[in-house]
Amino acid sequence: MAHHMWQHLSIFFSAFGPAINAFHLCRPVISIDACHLRDANNNILPVSYAIVDEETTHSWSWFLYQFRHFVAQDRQLSVISD
């Protein structure tokens, strides 16, 4: 039964409140798609993630829209990607 339920999920976005709050205390730089920045203590702050059926321009656009709306809000950001 769970296998059939999973087949209906094609796209999912998640961001946790404490990570969003911490993000607003960090430099306005995000790295996406397995490109990681570390702070002076060699730490990474995972802010959000998505599960998609395939990596496409549409799914990236959707993810970045969700990130802007729910996480970054009106903050100006620099984005680094591999």
Image: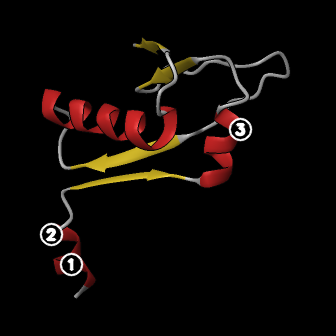
Residue drawn at (25%, 31%), measured in percent from left and top? 60
Q: Secondary structure at mark 3?
A: helix
Report the residue that reaches farthest toward the bottom. 1
Residue 78 placement (x, y as % from top left):
49, 11
Q: Amino acid at mark 3?
A: Ala
Q: Are marks 2 and 1 in contact (CB under 8 Å)?
A: yes
What amino acid type is highlighted by mark number 2? Answer: His
Determine whether 1 is above or below 58 in the image: below
Residue 33, position as x, y percentages in the image: 40, 26
| Number of residues whose C-alpha sits closer than 10 Å to that of mark 2, classed few (under 14), some (14–19) or many (20 or more) | few
Label for residue 5? 1
Relative to 25, is 7 above or below? below
Relative to 25, residue 79 above or below: above
Mark drawn on residue 8:
2
Q: Which residue is mark 3?
A: 22
Q: Earlier in the sequence, mark 1 or mark 3?
A: 1
* Of marks 1 and 3, the one in the foreground: 3
Q: Earlier in the sequence, mark 2 or mark 3?
A: 2
Q: Residue furthest front?
A: 74
Tell me the residue at 65%/33% (across/down): 23
Residue sitting at x 47%, y 34%:
73
How far apart marks 1 and 3 lie (CA) works out to 34 Å
**Viewer-nearest of labels 2 and 3?**
3
Q: Is residue 68 rendered to the left or right of residue 53?
A: right
Name the residue type under label 1: Met
Of 68 and 46, the residue lying toward us: 68
Element type where label 1 sits in the image: helix
For label 3, the crowd category at 10 Å Cα-Cα, with few meaning under 14, some 14 to 19 and many 20 or more, is few
